[in-house]
Image (cartoon, rainbow, N blue to C red):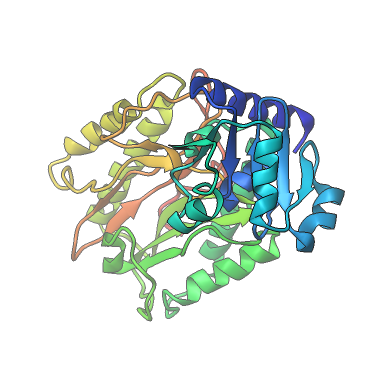
Amino acid sequence: MNLNSYIVKHNRIKDFLNKNKADAIVFISTQNTFWISNIKTSDGIVLVTPSKIFLLVDLREYEYCKKYVQYCEVVLFKQIADFKKIINDLNIKTLLFEKDYLTLKQKEQYLDSLKTVNSIPVDTISLRSIKTIDEIEVLQQSANIAVNAIEDVKKWIKVGMTEIDVPQHIRRYMINQGASNISFELIVAFGKNTAIPHHQPTNTRLQNNQMVTCDIGCIYLGYCSDITRTFFVGTPSCEEQEMYNLVLSAQKIGLENVKSQIYTNQLDGIVRSYIAKNKKWGNLFTHSLGHGVGIEIHELPFVSKRTNTILEENMVITIEPGVYQPGFNGVRIEDTVVVTKNGCINLTAKASKKFTI
């Protein structure tokens, strides 16, 4: 994390404190502590005031954090009393905490004993919805690994392999490319199983003339990637090609309509309306159009008919329409994009959308 990213994040939190009329905010979740400090700790706590950011860690990680953490003041944290002392020394009277992450046990442990402090629960995930330039660069690198994995599996896959074989291969490939882990349980489906949006891989073997769906992603330097491609092994029927073309066209429309200041439900509606006109599969788009991607695989904003968030520049979202006909096939195509003023930058554009391999 460079100085500019630190300043952007700190200013965002300062505005958040001002809006909520608070003196400070405490982050205990690994997601938010990593976002602010750019380092993963076991039990680290981040305390942010308008003037400074403190990273509280125990003896196991103190020397490491002192060496590698930039822009945060690293404080040795031995017991809960140390946290209370900092709160008292800084004369904090109103303290925000993570309603969306904090457990009841953590609240009791850290906050309930602060008798003179007004502790207020707030949703914090929105703080991460607009990415910094640094974050977008890492997200692009994470996406590149997933793109390469998709292209690799198309060359590697063979008739007779099981659904379980494929995610094992993809995981090994992505880790060899520098990923620390997969970003979610990889979805691989053959044939009729492609009609199950979140199918869990089984011992089903790939046959010739079958649809394959791969929904994959990895974690690289703490940031997730997410991409889905559906392709065909063999020669598709006219109906299978028609289903694929419908989703491909719908996804193209979605990508063309991504831009700053559009509402998420409006964007979802544009794609959903297009699919709805199809007489065969118009009512079989059964999930939301997309979601935010970042430190977590599902972040704000959610692109759904039930949300009315205004997209802003440098938000990172997926566009992933799909149709699913039980007993036949399903098709989903997904890209991860960065929202810009008048459009988007597709982080996963280099993955081919050619149907047959």
Q: Quadrant of residue 207?
A: bottom left
Left or right: residue 263 compared with residue 51: left
Left or right: residue 208 compared with residue 107: left
**Location of residue 316 with respect to 210 vertically, above or below:** above
Who's the residue at 64% across and 58% down the image?
Answer: 43
**Location of residue 286 with respect to 328 vertically, above or below:** above
Q: Quadrant of residue 173?
A: bottom right
- Pick the front one: 207 or 14: 14
Left or right: residue 273 compared with residue 299: left
**Location of residue 208 with respect to 225 vertically, above or below:** below
Who's the residue at 73% across and 31% down the image?
Answer: 52
Q: Residue furthest left?
A: 279
Q: Quadrant of residue 162?
A: bottom left
Residue 267 horizontal/vertical position (percent): 33, 29
Who's the residue at 41% across and 41% down the image?
Answer: 291
Residue 280 horizontal/vertical position (percent): 14, 47
Residue 335 horizontal/vertical position (percent): 47, 43
- Pick the front one: 77 or 85: 85
| Residue 256 appears in view | yes
Tell me the quadrant of the picture where the N terminus can be found: top right
Number of marks present in the image shown = 0
Left or right: residue 88 compared with residue 71: left
Residue 183 horizontal/vertical position (percent): 53, 57
| Residue 137 appears in view | no
- Pick the front one: 71 or 211: 71
